[in-house]
Amino acid sequence: MREILLTENDEINDDIADSKNSDLAGLLIQSGVNRNNHELLSELWDISQSHPIYRATMFLQCFKHLLQFIRFYDRQHRDKSDCLFYFSGPYMLLSYQAKENKIPIILLLSLHKVSETFGGENKLPCAVHDYNQTKCRVVATDQCIGSCTVRRINRRWPMTVFYNLIDIAAINALTI
């Protein structure tokens, strides 16, 4: 996230970028804890309806501005059966859609280092195969997250990944 802010405005101070990122994550976690993550953003910043923490932390336009830069490009030219692999250091982010009318599977992995797929008609990635082998652990984590999630309704899969990372970080912080 810090890199996204720095690429949009190279003159931004590192302390300001870190502060904005932690403010953004804090507000998202606060909306999950209060179970108001399905409310409109304008309602969260409304003086008469919401907690003052939203207005005290940052302006609504700044919050929207930070959220709009969490995305990947070339969405229109993607074939529906493609696998998208993104690598950053030891981590791999995978987006796989088996069929056109199915929801895409998005995985963040540290085990797999290369973009391998099984042969065949649908070109199943090896990471998805491994995910299917350990699905029960994922379901248990999703049940823990379900009680107070920061997820908001959106149509951009990078935002879904971002919200899920914050949910998992909150579960890990609670566990520690």
Image: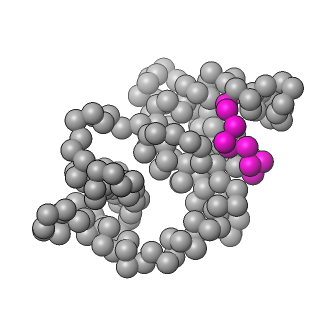
**What secondary structure is the stretch in magenta mostly built from?**
loop
Is residue 173 something that shows in the picture? no
Residue 12 vs residue 167, the one in the foreground:
167
Magenta part of the chain = 33-41
Residue 121 vs residue 129, the one in the foreground:
121
Check the image and tell me how it is coloured: one colour
Q: Image check: 95 left or right of 79?
A: right
Query: Looking at the figure, which quarter contains the C terminus?
Result: bottom right
Residue 46 higher or lower than 39, as above or below: above
The residue positioned 31% from the left and 67% from the top of the image is 127
Q: Where on the picture, by quarter, is residue 145?
A: bottom right
The residue positioned 41% from the left and 28% from the top of the image is 7
Tally of numbered tags: 0
Is residue 68 located in the magenta-colored stretch of the structure?
A: no
Q: Position of residue 130 (x, y in %)?
A: 33, 74
The residue positioned 17% from the left and 69% from the top of the image is 118
Q: Image check: 101 left or right of 117?
A: right
Q: Where on the picture, by quarter, is residue 67?
A: top right
The residue positioned 58% from the left and 27% from the top of the image is 64
Q: Image check: 133 left or right of 155?
A: left
Residue 37 higher or lower than 105, as above or below: above
Outermost residue on the right side: it is 48
Q: Position of residue 1 (x, y in %)?
A: 49, 39
Residue 15 vs residue 144, the one in the foreground:
144
Q: Position of residue 160 (x, y in %)?
A: 49, 47
Q: Position of residue 76 (x, y in %)?
A: 27, 33
Residue 55 vs residue 150, the one in the foreground:
150
Is residue 64 something that shows in the picture? yes
